[in-house]
Amino acid sequence: GQNIDQPTEMTATEGAIVQINCTYQTSGFNGLFWYQQHAGEAPTFLSYNVLDGLEEKGRFSSFLSRSKGYSYLLLKELQMKDSASYLCAVRPSGGYQKVTFGTGTKLQVIP
Amino acid sequence: GAGVSQSPRYKVAKRGQDVALRCDPISGHVSLFWYQQALGQGPEFLTYFQNEAQLDKSGLPSDRFFAERPEGSVSTLKIQRTQQEDSAVYLCASSLGDRFDTEAFFGQGTRLTVV
């Protein structure tokens, strides 16, 4: 099985940087997703990490450490529109690699 | 279509009523997933189809839940004798390949409220 842990809520200031952590325990690991979900909307894909290290994509970066079962999403130059829930999801190895989501971190960006 | 379409967007059901939720995946997408998302929680896996075959239904919470995808495109999630604990957003996702990958897209979901 899989166990995924994220903080429930975070608050950050417009223009600042925020790091959202995700830890996981899984019997087999293939990769880790980050999704953004605005209230009442569909989750949208942000990143997918397979190998250790940092991947940067504009204002968003995602980091993975497979040995530590740890990932973070880094959001720079925060904008009000970044207020949303951020979902960490793990894809295991084996089978069709059923993806399991964490409970999500609700980020509030304040002026 | 351009994206994954779900209908209805909102459904209010009286306890004990049967409901049917529809998902129109992106044309040509092989994989289709149903997730249940309770308020303030992450999506919880319900079931997975590869074309018309239901390969995994381990997440369906009870035998009141049933899903089908008879022609390998549109899928329907049916809930019989709805209970208050069934109130949630039901999300559908489709993926081009045979697994949930970076090309998987979600629909906007159906918000079910059981009263």
Image (tube, rainbow, N blue to C red):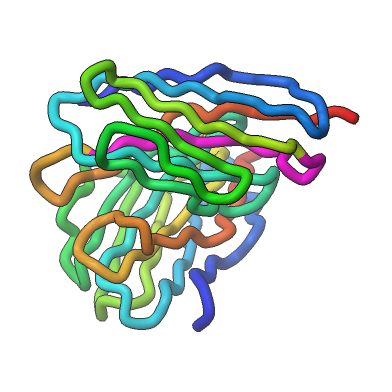
Q: Residue at x 26, y 41 (%)?
A: A50
Image spot of residue A49 (x, y percent): 33, 42
Task: Tell whether B12 sits left or right of B80.
Answer: right
Image spot of residue B10 (x, y percent): 66, 56
Task: Tell whether B38 sits left or right of B32.
Answer: right
Please indicate, yes or no, whether residue B49 appears anywhere in the rendered image: yes
The residues colored magenta run A79-91
Quadrant showing the C terminus of chain A: top right
- Decide which of A110, B41 is in the foreground and name it: A110
Indicate the quadrant where residue A67 lies: top left
The answer to whether residue B113 is magenta is no
Task: Tell whether B18 sits left or right of B60.
Answer: right
Task: Tell whether A49 sits left or right of B3.
Answer: left
Give the residue furthest to the left: A94
Q: Residue at x 31, y 58 (%)?
A: B67
Please indicate, yes or no, whether residue B59 appears anywhere in the rendered image: no
Indicate the quadrant where residue B52 lies: bottom left
Image spot of residue A93 (x, y percent): 13, 40
- Decide which of A31, B67 is in the foreground and name it: A31
Residue B22's place in the image compared with A109, above or below, is: below
Residue A47's place in the image compared with A89, above or below, is: below
Quadrant showing the N terminus of chain A: top left
- Decide which of A85, B5 is in the foreground and name it: A85
- Decide which of A51, B78 is in the foreground and name it: A51
Image spot of residue B45 (x, y percent): 34, 42
Q: Residue at x 26, y 19 (%)?
A: A25
Name the dominant secondary structure of the magenta segment: strand
Give the residue furthest to the right: A111
Q: Residue at x 59, y 48 (%)?
A: B112
Query: Number of marks in the image?
Result: 0
Indicate the quadrant where residue B61 lies: top left
Residue B15's place in the image compared with A19, above or below, is: below
